[in-house]
Amino acid sequence: MAFPTNRMRRLRRNQRLRNMVRETRLSPECMIYPIFVCPGDNVKKEVSSMPGQFNLSIDNAVKVAREAEQAGIAGILLFGIPEEKDELGSDAFNEDGIIQKALRAIRENVRELLLITDICLCEYTSHGHCGVIRHGDVDNDPTLKLLADSAVSHVRAGADIVAPSDMMDGRVAAIRRGLDDEGLTGTPIMSYAAKYASGFYGPFREAAGSTPKFGDRRTYQMDPPNAREALREIALDIEEGADIVMVKPALAYLDIISQARERFDVPIAAYQVSGEYSMIEAAARAGWIERERVILETTTAIKRAGADILITYYALELAKTL
């Protein structure tokens, strides 16, 4: 039965009505806050391309972790910036590496917050790529052991979840075997399953000091025009043992999130990445958009597309305002 009997505006008349019938809801319990941990004491250095985000020394990372726990968000995603880098990214699997030290310090101070670590080598290598370099490109198979060693080291230091972001073929299976062989069978893997070779990563690379010294990452990260390939990547990671799968970036790939939600019966995470954050901040500072409104609109869109878990630099802010 059509207008005038059916009037869609009836349930939009005021905020209480709109809240009552809202289909997609944001909550802190589904959010993860990324932080960058660097050497030193009492360091809080703002990332110039990401206003409001910082490189934090371990003591300040502990403070942010406490704040995140009190705000009720699910967890933090830790990225390490080592004091020294080498060809193999050794600090990633060093028992006294920057992330391992941070995990132990944070775990001493917070109990309920999930500690999630990025498993990759790009932040730790002198060349800025995500694995072992042979003949000018990342050699897939030798990289797998280093990733598995990193995951085991992080979990021993206190990580609750490991999140491989390297996009090497077979990395989830290698990490699962590595964890299981050490008796760490209860540790979930949150795989960056569909990670695209995106132009939205620039500010992150400034924050983590991970810009490649040569070439780019297109031989291992996904080609942006491909959707069916993303579903293959996700299916393979689930087959290898991923407990949670991730789509990254989020806003330019809402269709991938939606298709993954329809096809796969596992938790799906989506990462609102640095470039997405920086565009909102830049436009807001220029007075072109309503900042708070756009933050809510974009994060809601990611959830509406089908993401169960939202990784966003706005997690702390949203947790305080929702």
Image (cartoon, rainbow, N blue to C red):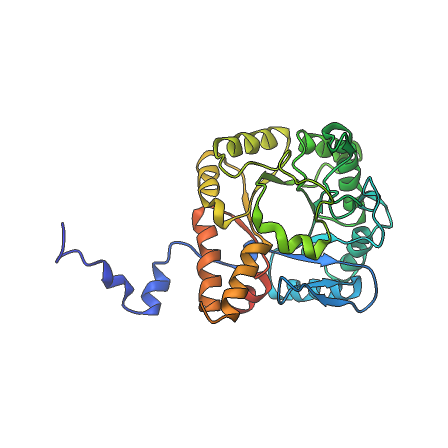
Q: In the depicted view, which residue is nearer to us: 305 or 202?
A: 202
Q: Is residue 28 left or right of residue 82?
A: left
Q: In the depicted view, which residue is nearer to us: 151 or 111?
A: 151
**Seen from this angle, which residue lies furthest right?**
96
On screen, 229 above or below 278?
above
Q: Is residue 322 visible?
A: no
Image quarter for residue 312? bottom right
Residue depicted at 37% across the width and 58% down the height: 22
On screen, 293 above or below 226?
below
Q: Is residue 125 left or right of residue 4?
A: right
Residue depicted at 74% across the width and 30% down the height: 139
Residue 322 pos. (x, y %): 49, 66
Residue 144 pos. (x, y %): 75, 32
On screen, 47 above or below 156?
below
Residue depicted at 75% across the width and 66% down the height: 60
Q: What number of labels is visible?
A: 0
Residue depicted at 44% across the width and 60% down the height: 297
On screen, 318 above or below 160?
below
Q: Is residue 279 left or right of residue 185?
A: left
Q: Is residue 50 visible?
A: yes
Image quarter for residue 11? bottom left
**Seen from this angle, which residue lies furthest front?**
214
Residue 51 pos. (x, y %): 62, 66
Residue 160 pos. (x, y %): 70, 48
Q: In the depicted view, which residue is nearer to us: 97 or 281?
A: 281
